[in-house]
Image (cartoon, rainbow, N blue to C red):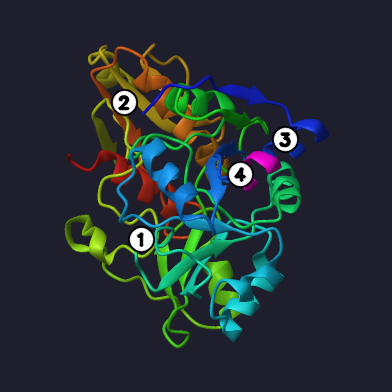
Amino acid sequence: MATVTTRVLRGTPRNLNRLAAALRRGELVAVPTETVYGLAGDALNPDAADAIFAAKGRPANDPLIVHLHDRRQLASLAVVNESALKLARAFWPGPLTLVLPKLPAVPDRVTSGHASVAVRVPSHPLFRKLLRLCGRPLAAPSANLFGYLSPTTAEHVRAGLGGRIRSILDGGPCAFGLESTIVDLRDEARPALLRPGALAREAIEAVLSRKLRVPAQPAGGDRAQVVAPGQLTRHYSPRTPLVLHASLPAAAVVARHSQEVFVFLARPPTPHPANVRWLDERGDLRGVARRLFAELRALDDGAWKKIHVELARGDDGWGPAINDRLHRAAAKR
């Protein structure tokens, strides 16, 4: 891939108009969303989809999520059912992705050959302005090299994709820090949770008045069965080995492993050793989610031999999404 000059741009009206024109020409733009930064390209242009896969080093059989400016655009891309309409009215714009049967307008390259498409309406104001100005649905997986930790700032994107893409739209740190929740509605009678995320499962079930199935993950991350992102066994991974714990050891034990770093959910009682970190002062899981990828990136750039991380407790709210990312990050290569 030829090296290009990468620019980080503020969301001024002039820049947004230039970036919208670039997207219409089939170019790629890294964009802020409320979840993580995405690498956007025209979802109706197969060549733009190919460029996304190439820039990320992403396997062509791992489908992309399509982003819309307005939920009324959904009917032009997918076969819509009543459950999808209920969830769209309740949660869009927001961090919910729906998997539905696709219409011919969506290129097979975007869906990796599947007869379904993953779609959402994001809530980040700059991305919404860009979608409106562009006038096209945009495919936008996370703006990182495939398999690495998702980016939550423009600088994270530049560190990973600098020289591979021309433009990064800087919208500040992401509000949620974890990817969207993905719900499979191809069979309306059997809705399924494919990926826990920034929207709690319980909120979705309340709107649908039924429980979501949680299907078994594709065996060995079999990409032939992957109909939406985030289903591979190993994903969101730092280079440094990651070790997970139901609870981390006491300070005296931690201090004896000075070349390894220990990441708590909440700030542990002081004094604590120099190799201790925490994700939220009080252990609030929303704060943990917002900081998780950024903290793992920072530690991955250090000289630590191992990163130990405390798992979230509880099977509702943010806990399942946090633990899902951690288990995939820690999975053996």
Which residue has dot 2 on it? 250
Residue 331, percent from left and from top: 22, 43
Foreground mark, 1 or 4, reads: 4
Q: Secondary structure at mark 1?
A: loop
Label 1 to label 3, Cα distance in Å? Answer: 29 Å
Magenta highlight range: 20-25
Choose between 241 and 228: the one closer to the eye.
Answer: 228
Q: Quadrant of residue 303?
A: top left
Q: In this rendering, does residue 12 appear at all? A: no
123 shown above or below 145: below
Q: Is residue 320 left or right of residue 317?
A: left
Q: Quadrant of residue 25?
A: top right
Q: Earlier in the sequence, mark 1 or mark 4?
A: 4
Q: Is residue 307 left or right of residue 177?
A: left
Q: Secondary structure at mark 3?
A: helix
Q: Secondary structure at mark 2?
A: loop
| Residue found at the very far right of the displayed protein | 13
Q: Circles 1 and 2: CB distance less than 8 Å?
A: no
Q: In this rendering, does residue 169 appear at all? A: yes
Which residue has dot 3 on it? 18
Q: Which mark is residue 25?
A: 4
Q: Earlier in the sequence, mark 3 or mark 4?
A: 3
Q: Earlier in the sequence, mark 1 or mark 3?
A: 3
Q: Main secondary structure of the magenta part?
A: helix
Foreground mark, 2 or 3, reads: 3
- Kind of residue at badge 1: Ser
- Kind of residue at badge 2: Ala
Choose between 156 and 181: the one closer to the eye.
Answer: 156
